[in-house]
Amino acid sequence: MNLTMVIADDEPLSLKSEELFIRKEFPDIIISGLAGDGIQLKQMLEQLKPDIAIVDICMPGLSGIEVIELLQHKDCSTHFIINTAYSNFEYIKKALDFRTDGYILKPGKREEKIEVINRLFKNVEMEREETQKHNQLKSALSLVNPVLGNEILMSIFSETCEESDFETYCNINGIDFSYGCIATFLPKTKRNISRRALHEELDKALGTICDFLITITEHGIVIMLFVPLKLEREEQKSWCREVALLVAKCMEEKTGIEYLYGIGNIYDSFSCMKNSYKDSIKELHSDKQEIKGLYIENADKIESYIMKAKEYVNSYFNEDISLIDCAHYVRISPYYLSHIFKNRTGQTFVEYLSMIRISEAKRLSSNTGLTIKDISEHCGYYNITYFCKVFKRFTGKTIGEYRKWHSNENNQ
């Protein structure tokens, strides 16, 4: 792993000596700058942002301690090693108080210098790995959260309210859920607006206020607000209305469209969010606005998704297809398709696919001229052993037994 370093010393001979020492003993460290005074050091640290800096305490312009102190207030990530001819402990302790990572004395023993820099090298390496893991997790969450959040809201619309998914979402995002409500927003006029851009604006508007879940459909916007626990019960409803008004104004400002909105009652259980959603729709209707019931339309939409998924399976069962392929065809996420398919049909996607394939396999088995391999591949199975296991699980018979049974049935 390559690290970058800046070395600062007002004595040219000492500066060159430290440079040669680092190049010889630590070839993986890239020396990105050499500073002869404190002002030059400060500029280098701000511009180059090195991983490590070896800093002389006493330098003209600004002392090493003053530079370190100044950069503490600028979110500086550089690790500091102080280099000094002063062995006075109190003086060194003052430098260590400013988040320095060690010190070396000059002149000092080679082994001691190597030990101090090696220790810091390992610490920076571990820090980098942790940062990388954190960034990877953050990146993964940025992809997963919108999808999972959307599926959670969809489960509210379909009245299944997936508690386990909601708990997972809260756990991975460090959210303590106490109270929540649903706010539904409908535009007064239709206009094509980028959902992504609208989502980003809502994230900005709500991000500093509370935790939330958002789904944006062709009809409108539904937001689940996580109501802060610190609010008194009588304050919660007015807080929700203030937030909803802020959202409506934000969307009107960004889109030029006025939004109507309804706010559902506040509940302390996620399973009751379906009631809060219905409450929000009722409030919209109570204003005598001409709107369509989103819940009904969502129910119809779900049925159309199921029909389209079955259509895909019935057409392509003899190919190597998967839930992901089908979801792409239907144009919804694999997770959501899996969820609604099981909920509406009582079967998983794989069970339905297997049922269609085995139904065809039974038909083909009546033709004794086809080999098991032929039947298997024609039905989308390219592993014969697996095909035979699935066939027996569905029919209770092997291919040979089924053929014999089918033959006897026809001869009676």
Image (cartoon, helix red, strand yellow):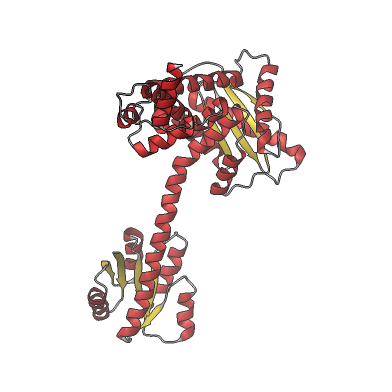
Nearer-the-camera pick, 308 or 171: 308
Task: Answer above or below: position of 2 versus 290.
Answer: below
* Residue that extends furthest to the right in the rendered view of this protein: 234
Q: Residue furthest front?
A: 412
Left or right: residue 204 compared with residue 129? right
In this rendering, does residue 211 appear at all? Answer: no
The quadrant holding residue 209 is top right
Q: Position of residue 33 (x, y in %)?
A: 27, 66
Residue at (41% x, 63% y) in the render: 127
Q: Report which quarter residue 287 is drawn in.
A: top right
Rendered location of residue 336, percent (x, y): 50, 31
At horizontal 23% and vertical 73% (from top left) the residue drawn is: 23
Question: In the figure, 138 relative to 390: above or below?
Answer: below
Residue 285, compared with residue 324, is above or below; it is: above
Q: Could you tell me which quadrant the N terminus lies in?
A: bottom left
Q: x%, y% of residue 24?
A: 22, 76
